[in-house]
Amino acid sequence: IVQHAELDYQKKYLPLIKEAATQKEARRSDLAMLEDRILTREGKKQVYGTQLRLNQTTQRMELYPIEDEENVNARRAEVGLEPLADYLKRVFGIDYAPPKKN
C-alpha cells in the first residue's frame, strides 16, 4: 500500500520500513523501490533504477535519471535486485546499456 500511496504517506512510513528492513522484517529491495519512488516524486535522481516513466514524445518507457548510474548495479546487488539491464529487459523489453566508466 505504501508503494502506491501519496508522497506524504510514503515519507511518513519510510523510517518504519527502513527499520523493518534492518530487522529483516521487510525486503531491502522493497525499501530501495520506495526510496526511488520518493526521490523521483521530489524531482531528484533515483538511486537504484527502479522507476520508469512514459516519454510523451517517443511514447516509450524510460528510466528516471539515476544518481551515479555507473555504479547502479553494485547498489542493486546490495539490496537483492538483479542487474538493471536484466530487469529492464525482463519486465519492459527495454535494451539497456550502462554508461561507460570514465
Image (spheres, rainbow, N blue to C red):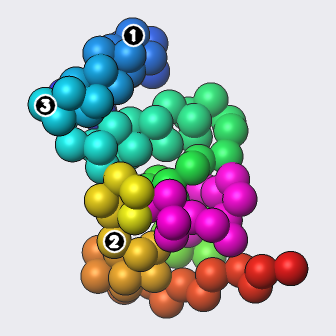
Q: Which residue is mark 2?
A: 82
Q: Which residue is mark 1?
A: 12
Q: Is residue 67 magenta?
A: yes
Q: Earlier in the sequence, mark 1 or mark 3?
A: 1
Q: Amino acid at mark 2?
A: Glu
Counting from the top left corner in percent of width and height, residue 24 is at 17, 35
Residue 21 visible in this rendered orientation of the protein = yes
Q: Which residue is mark 3?
A: 25
Spatial CA distance of label 2 from label 1 is 28 Å
Q: Is residue 17 left or right of residue 10?
A: left
Q: Residue 55: which quarter of the image?
A: bottom right
Q: In the image, what residue occupies the spot 68% across and 36% down?
A: 43
Q: Amino acid at mark 1?
A: Lys
Spatial CA distance of label 2 from label 3 is 20 Å
Q: Residue 99: which quarter of the image?
A: bottom right
Q: Earlier in the sequence, mark 2 or mark 1?
A: 1
SS at badge 1: helix
Looking at the image, which is closer to me, 61 or 22?
A: 22
User: Badge 2: few (under 14), some or many (20 or more) residues near its Cα, within 10 Å?
Assistant: some
Query: Does 52 sit above or below residue 40?
Result: below
User: Badge 1: few (under 14), some or many (20 or more) residues near its Cα, within 10 Å?
Assistant: few
SS at badge 3: loop
Residue closest to the far front = 23
Q: Earlier in the sequence, mark 2 or mark 3?
A: 3
Spatial CA distance of label 1 from label 3 is 18 Å
What span is colored magenta in the figure? 62-76
Query: Does 101 sit above or below residue 63?
Result: below
Point out the frontmost of discs 2 and 3. Answer: 3
Q: In the rendered image, which quarter contains the N terminus?
A: top left
